[in-house]
Image (tube, rainbow, N blue to C red):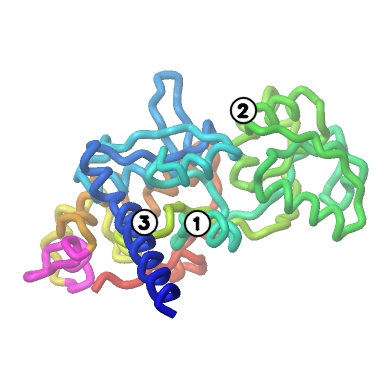
Amino acid sequence: MKKAILSAVIGAAVLGGASVASAATLQDVKGKGFVTCGVSAGIPGFSNPDDKGEWSGIDVDYCRGIATAVFGDPTKAKFVALSSKDRFPALQSGEVDVLTRNTTWTISRDTSLGFNFRTVNYYDGQGFIAKKSLNVKSALELSGAAVCVQTGTTTELNLADYFKTNNLQYNPVVFEKESDATSAYDSGRCDVYTTDQSGLYAIRLKLKNPDENVVLPEVISKEPLGPAVRQGDDQWFDIVSWVHYAMVNAEELGITSKNVDEQKNSANPDVKRLLGTEEGTKIGTDLGVTNDWAYNIIKKVGNYGEVFDRNVGAGSPLKIERGQNALWTKGGLQYAPPVR
């Protein structure tokens, strides 16, 4: 019995030490002076560098939002391009502080991989793009097709499930990198390419003859995309989550990067709490940042609608409709807990 108790005490001490060691992400970020985000190597609209190495996209702006919450400065964000294969080891090892890399929230990633997800910054679903010359109108006509797909992704698993469920045959052409899979599809090594539908619209822009390709109507999966952090650090988890919630609440309240200074004079209690102007507010400091954290995010990065529109929506080459990513007040799924 004494041995059992002693073992339990030692075990608790070891676990306690591990917890303390893993619960220091905010301090580590402040110590090095920037937040490191794992992003995709190049998906227009989500995370994509231009010829000067300047990054843009929804996931990039999310990272800049985190940097702004912590430092008040969106330029304090560093981006590490990761393949589908490398992204999880990079987060587990601490190479990156957070994954903002169009990653699907699943139970296995939430548990066995040791990650935490909470917010969804883009509701997506897997689809197919095919050459018009293939003359198919539906994914149900793809039996026998060669399908390009990235390995190590839920996309690969969903593809196998879809064809098995519908008693269809296919020939997988597997690649580690999205760019290699896209090039193979564009050169005719496969008939079809499959990934999240948002990615298909981005990929079509990069093809030699975009108009000769069509996105098929089927959506074969649920792909809630959002940031992931390591388990064991509730404070960092909360900061990363509430960056998104602040952007969504701002859009719902009609606060934009253009009118946020004027809104600081608002008498609306919801606005005052969000922008840190309510007397005696401690919301920001309780989170581990300053009380004007949300004001800074909105002013320097934008609300959720602004980020969506300029990267993938009406103000972007992709022209993707809001759909499920509209606010809950407008028929969509974007819903944020209240700031109070």
- Residue 255 horizontal side relative to residue 181, left or right: left
Disc 3 target residue: 18
User: Farthest bottom residue?
Assistant: 1
- In this view, 179 is above or below 107: above
Q: Residues within 10 Å of mark 3 (few under 14, many from 20)?
A: few
In the image, residue 47 lies at what x, y percent?
A: 47, 37
Q: Nearer the viewer, residue 107 or 340?
A: 107
Q: Quadrant of the N terminus?
A: bottom left
The local secondary structure at tag 1 comes to: loop
Q: Residue drawn 40% across and 19% down?
A: 52
Alpha carbons under labels 2 and 1: distance apart: 35 Å
Disc 2 target residue: 206
Q: Nearer the viewer, mark 3 or mark 1?
A: 3
The segment highlighted magenta reads 268-286
- Residue 127 horizontal side relative to residue 268, left or right: right
- In this view, 163 is above or below 316: below
Identity, as a three-letter code, of the amino acid under mark 2: Lys
Q: First in sequence, mark 3 or 1: give its number.
A: 3
- In reply to whether residue 271 is colored magenta, the answer given is yes
Count of numbered labels shown in the rendering:
3
In the image, residue 247 lies at what x, y percent?
A: 33, 57
Identity, as a three-letter code, of the amino acid under mark 3: Ala
Q: Residue drawn 63% across and 34% down?
A: 203
Where, by quadrant of the figure, is residue 131 drawn?
Answer: top right
Q: Nearer the viewer, mark 2 or mark 1?
A: 1
Disc 1 target residue: 114
Alpha carbons under labels 3 and 1: distance apart: 14 Å
Q: Is residue 140 visible?
A: yes
Q: Quadrant of the C terminus?
A: bottom left
Where, by quadrant of the figure, is residue 318 drawn?
Answer: top right
Q: Nearer the viewer, residue 101 or 128?
A: 101
Identity, as a three-letter code, of the amino acid under mark 1: Gly
